[in-house]
Amino acid sequence: MGKTYIQQLFKAYNITVDAGRQQLFEEFMSDERNILAAEQIITNQRLLMDTWQFKNRLADIQQQQVVIPNATVGKAYTARFDFAQLKWEDFTWSGINGLEDIGLAYDTATAEIKGTPVKSGDFKIRLQYRLQGQAEETPLNEKLVSLVINPNPRSLWKDLPSDREGAFWKEDNVTAFAPLGDKHLVAASKRGRSHANTGAYRDDDFAFTHLADSGWSILAVADGAGSAIASREGSRLACNYIIDYFEKEFSPALQADFDALLAEYATTGSDATQKKLTRFVYDILGAAAFTTHKKLDEFAGGQGMSLKDFHSTLIFVLLKKYVHGYVIMSFGVGDCPIGLVHTGASDITLMNRLDVGEFGGGTRFITMPEIFKSDTFATRFGFKLVPGFSYLMLMTDGIYDPKFEVEANLDRLSAWQSLLADLGGQNDDRIQVTLDAPSEDTARQLAAWMDFWSPGNHDDRTLMIIC
Amino acid sequence: MNGEPIEAVKNGVQVMISTLRQHPQALETAFISVITFDTSARQLLPLTDLAYFQMVDIKASGTTALGAALELVSICIDKEVAKTTTEQKGDWKPLVFILTDGVPTDNWQHGLEQFKQRKVAFTVACAVGGNADTGVLKQITDNVVSLETADGQHISKFFTWVTASVGVSSTKVEYSGKEVLGLDELPPPPAELNIVT
């Protein structure tokens, strides 16, 4: 080997050995010291090359982008370093220290980071390793790998009270229970986490009354627009104006007209009666909605504000028990559904069509003059005469979004049955709302149930149940 | 863009993400996409859940293909932002932030035409350094901010502001833009109306 090296060396330097010096060269080549010197050079060259290759490999590993998935506090986590995919087949050992502080551990055998993180943040974890050919006693190599641990969103929500001194302040959370003829009303309205997080106000509202003399109940639910500065007052006023309107304008004479029409409808059911009833519903409920719109406009003007500042959706229902059954009449603008669950939860009637835009959050409000001019205005009314019913529910999108998700589900009995089962205790928190024996407690249970967790759904929640 | 400005942008994105991760509404609902544009535009990161976001290596050197970027963001909005249907829940309207330090070198009007047809909650354009053309940006959006000197401190201020904007966008809005004059009385019902059936 040494001999070949010397020959190559001479050649590289253009040193030729004359024929006369061949004898001398043979002697030179057989001198052990010379051979040894050549062999030492070769060994040193190998060492240099090996060291360079090793350093090169380490540098490659340093530069290599190694991505491991983000973790979340409180959520079980596993991330494996796939040695084949990472081209780390030359790793003979790997380990990570210090993961215990964040609730994780590294399994050397499986190359997995495992555990349930306890701390959030952007961490740099130190992956230590040894490569093939590296002696046991040499220090370990190190590579920093980024690990993002997201906080548990649940831990981030703050519950800041709203400012009682602020304009149009209202209670953050309210409940109601009241007998309503032979039915009961149970309702709760809660400020959503998105508002609680910033100390903002509840935009939802509801109101109701039972006119004992005539037996009519009037129910209203409204949801102020998050984008409008005084929508919390808009929703409160919209509900109250509706109650006011019927208390004042639904005169005994009008009621008598309606009673007569209904009796006719229940007995004959003729087309002519249907038309008259339709007109009655349109006129009186339409007038109530329109008067509410106008009064909101006046109120806004009086405040030196724009009607838009009070943007709110509105749904309302008139309910009365007759010998023929229950009459339910409704009006709705916005994205709050009114659902009538028939006796024995055997069927569902969605009383109104929702106003839903192309993108999240888009809807229409009682404060928009164009809704009264639009062709769709006439489709905002509902009428139903039923022998009996299990539940009548009025809700804001804070309930509808997490519990029904999409509009199509509102027409599906199964979705309503799921909601009823959920209210009956089939939920993560095991909270049961005793709708079969309604009382003050039921309203409190409903309020507690309303704290249910649904990621991304933290709007105000309002649910009014007649049962 | 290179040197300190691009480093500042990268740092800004990183700080923005870290801050958004502390915001519960953003952490549960926000998705992020990154598009870079120099001689061409490319989507560096498809729309990704904030919780899964991993920092990308942002590079932008060469010319300023703003038009291509506007066209690409339009395509991405069509593809990645869900619209509401009866069987599908729509996403919130996207927020678009544009950062540039140069004058567009391509047919940006064509890209703008595409972009104007897309519905966004709002668009903010940020002119970084003295070379950007705020006149062009003004035609994209009314919200144009200018960072006179493209240093880390200024760019980080912009990202602080972007971060604050993301947190406030998911609120109920009206979905009809048309203005109608007030009415005095309720219009009569259409003849064929059937409420009671």
Image (cartoon, coloured by chain):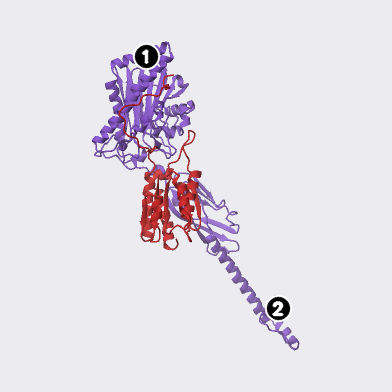
Residue A3, which numbered label? 2
Q: Quadrant of residue A320?
A: top left
Residue A50: horizontal and vertical position, in percent? 60, 68
Three-letter amino acid code at disc 1?
A: Leu
Q: Quadrant of the C terminus of chain A?
A: top left
Q: Which residue is mark 1?
A: A261
In the rendered image, the residue lying farthest to the bottom is: A20
Q: Which chain is purple?
A: A
Q: Chain of mark 2?
A: A
Residue A189, which numbered label? none
Question: Can residue A146 be spotted in the picture?
Answer: no
Is A442 in front, or is A386? Answer: A386
Residue A359: horizontal and vertical position, in percent? 44, 39
Three-letter amino acid code at disc 2?
A: Lys
Disc 1 on helix, strand or loop? helix
Disc 2 to disc 1, C-alpha distance: 122 Å
